[in-house]
């Protein structure tokens, strides 16, 4: 009799416990939260990529840059590769960086120092502007420095070995490369980015 009296009580407790658990469970809490809203907001805030200018504009700019580079090469050849027999006895090669710079600064007239140093700096500026316009792959400070130094080093070697009255000077290479770097930082990089924008693949955020 005691066992039979206990059976309905346990059954009643089991049913009440299951009923209370069903009441406490919230179906909304088990539903997964949508993630599309956050990704949509992030994609909306992402910066837009630069659009390329029309082909005609890019072609025209490239042709103008090529013509300017040819003119620059002609001026460079005239200034550096023209023989000067009168100064043959006064010229000497310089392989030590800074020696010619000290000689320029030790001159009695400031005008001569500005002419020598400023002339070599100005001579390299067009190269830093036109090079990334013609060849977008050369964009970058290190690339501009290396290409300019290699080009001016070749010019100095030809100048010292084949041209009468001219000598190799490592300080001229340094000044020309510095001028190209100035031209690239001031104008060449911005013009190259405007005419030849790079495409960057961006991964969509989930």
Image (cartoon, rainbow, N blue to C red):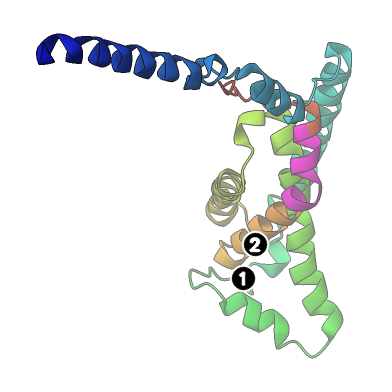
> Where residue 161 sits in the image (x, y, percent)?
52, 53
Q: Position of residue 133 (x, y in %)?
A: 75, 32
Task: Answer with mark 2 or mark 1, whichever residue precedes in sequence.
Answer: 1
Q: Quadrant of the C terminus?
A: top right
Q: Which residues are magenta?
A: 183-193
* Residue found at x 57% / y 78%: 99
In percent of width and height, residue 181 lies at: 68, 54
Q: Is residue 94 above or below residue 32?
A: below
Q: Does residue 96 lie above or below 110 as drawn? A: above
The N terminus, quarter of image: top left
- The residue shown at (72%, 57%) is 179
Residue 160 colored in magenta in the image: no
Front-lying residue, 179 or 18: 18
Please tell me how many numbered marks the rendered image carries.
Answer: 2
- Look at mark 2 in the image and give the residue it sits on: 165
Separation of residues labelled 2 and 1 (CA atoms): 6 Å
Q: Quadrant of the rendered structure where residue 130 is?
A: top right
Q: Say which of 81 and 94 sits in front.
A: 94
Q: Residue at x 81, y 46 (%)?
A: 187
Q: Is residue 107 visible?
A: yes
Q: What is the chief secondary structure element of the magenta stretch?
A: helix
Give the secondary structure at mark 1: loop
Q: Secondary structure at mark 2?
A: loop
Query: Does residue 48 appear in the picture of this structure?
Result: no
Frontmost residue, 117 versus 76: 117
Q: Position of residue 24 (x, y in %)?
A: 48, 22
Left or right, 174 with respect to 184, comes to left
Q: Residue at x 67, y 60 (%)?
A: 178
* Disc 2: CA contacts within 10 A as few (<14), some (14-19) or many (>=20): some
The picture quadrant where one finds residue 101 is bottom right
Which residue is under mark 1? 91
Are the residues at dot 2 and dot 1 in contact (C-beta closer than 8 Å)? yes
């Amino acid at each position: 009799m005691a066992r039979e009296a206990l059976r309905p009580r346990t059954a009643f407790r089991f049913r009440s416990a299951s009923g209370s658990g069903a009441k406490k469970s919230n179906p909304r809490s088990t539903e997964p939260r949508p993630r599309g809203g956050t990704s949509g907001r992030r994609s909306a805030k992402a910066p837009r990529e630069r659009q390329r200018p029309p082909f005609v504009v890019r072609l025209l700019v490239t042709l103008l840059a090529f013509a300017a580079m040819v003119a620059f090469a002609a001026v460079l050849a005239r200034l550096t590769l023209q023989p000067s027999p009168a100064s043959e006895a006064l010229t000497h090669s310089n392989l030590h960086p800074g020696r010619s710079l000290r000689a320029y600064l030790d001159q009695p007239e400031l005008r001569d120092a500005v002419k020598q140093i400023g002339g070599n700096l100005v001579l390299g500026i067009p190269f830093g502007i036109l090079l990334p316009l013609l060849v977008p792959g050369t964009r970058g400070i290190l690339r501009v420095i290396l290409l300019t130094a290699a080009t001016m080093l070749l010019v100095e070697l030809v100048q010292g070995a084949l041209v009468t009255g001219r000598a190799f000077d490592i300080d001229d290479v340094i000044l020309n490369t510095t001028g190209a770097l100035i031209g690239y930082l001031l104008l060449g990089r911005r013009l190259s980015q405007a005419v030849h924008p790079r495409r960057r693949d961006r991964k969509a955020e989930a």
